[in-house]
Image (tube, rainbow, N blue to C red):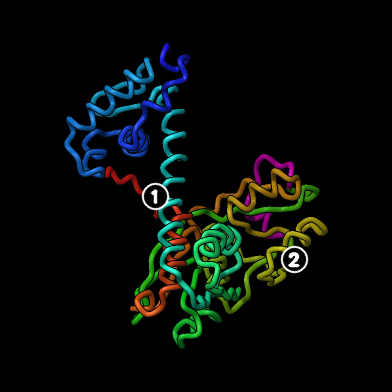
Amino acid sequence: MANLQRGGLVRQLTLRHLRVIHGLAEHRLVARVSAELNVTQPAVSKQIAELEEIVGTPIIRRERNRLHLTPVGRRLADHARQVLNQLDRAEFDLQAMASGVAGTVNIGVVSSVAPIVLPQAITLFKNAAPNASLSITEGHFVSLYPRLDAGQFDLLIARTWQPQDLEGIDQTVLLTEPLVVVAGRNHPLAKMAEIAWIEAVRWPWILPQPDSVARRAVDAMFAERGVTPPGNTISSLSLSLNLELLQQMPTLGMFPQSLAKAHVARGDLVVLPLDTGDFLSEARCFWKTGGQQNNNAFALFMKCLGQVSEHGQTIPFG
């Protein structure tokens, strides 16, 4: 560990070293890392050997044909990921600013996705293109899709249930994140280690609108668990209103997992031990075919979404 103590570690690391350790953390196979980086396997092995010489301690251990990072290797991979993400962000930001993008992007989005990806994407977009404008409309898929089809929206972001091809519409997966059942911290179910669905549906629920795709998916989820959907319901799209209701009355609802965790950490909510499986876990982007070619601002915003979603992470070797 002598090199760590001399303070020269960071100065000896190159982008190739960082991309290799990041690739190892992701793939755990030299063959996959070499394919991802478009280099030979011996080149990857050479970078690993150089990394271990620089660090002064092993960063990997081998089990059969798999590689596992040591604690030092994992910490180095974490730092490498942060550095590479920042460099990708800087390159993207400078290119976008140099392009002088202007114009307007009109976005329709469902409420359960909006707070997860849009704040970061909008921040990145406005930093890169301060003269471009954004318009955000929240709703549910059934009400938003006709406006996309009519050309009133450039982009629609929605959770999907039983996704299918749509004529003249391109689509891609933006993120995968489960929904969880939540309650206020004073709810009678909040401290229970085990809860049956039959018990949960006896309480009031906050659910999507009855005519929405999400509501049909919710009803199907209840049916799959052998229970009748709750009859005592409040239909609301507003996450802020739903949060207040959950804290003020003994009702149950569903939040995206990351958002639920944030409110659990603040002491606002608890996540109940009810398995929702993959129910509505996938969020997709929908846009009219050719839309990005006709609107530079929209094309830039799609790149911003890619930067903040897991599907935008890359480890180029050059």
Up-down relation of residue 167 to residue 6 (above or below): below
Q: Which quarter shows the C terminus? A: top left
Residue 313 relative to residue 246: left or right: left
Up-down relation of residue 175 to residue 167 (above or below): above
Other-residue count near label 2 (Cα within 10 Å), few / some / many at <14 / 14–19 / ≥20 = few
> What's the distance in space between the residues labelled 1 and 2, CA to CA?
34 Å
- Specify start and end residues of the magenta stretch as a single range: 190-202
* Residue 196 visible from this viewpoint: yes
Give the labeled residue for mark 1. 313
Q: Amino acid at mark 1?
A: Gln
Q: Nearer the viewer, residue 80 or 184?
A: 80
Up-down relation of residue 180 to residue 211 (above or below): above
Between tags 1 and 2, which lies in front?
1
Residue 261 relative to residue 266: left or right: left
Of the numbered discs 1 and 2, the one sitting upstream in the chain is 2
Q: Nearer the viewer, residue 27 or 248?
A: 27
Secondary structure that dominates the magenta span: loop
Residue at 39% across, 50% down: 313
Q: Quadrant of residue 181?
A: bottom right
Please tell me whether residue 193 belongs to the stretch shown in magenta.
Answer: yes
Give the labeled residue for mark 2. 241
Q: Position of residue 28 (x, y in %)?
A: 31, 33
Q: Position of residue 295 (x, y in %)?
A: 41, 77
Residue 118 relative to residue 233: left or right: left
Q: Amino acid at mark 2?
A: Leu
Residue 54 relative to residue 5: left or right: left
Q: Position of residue 82 (x, y in %)?
A: 47, 40
Q: Position of residue 315 (x, y in %)?
A: 33, 45
Residue at 45% across, 51% down: 90
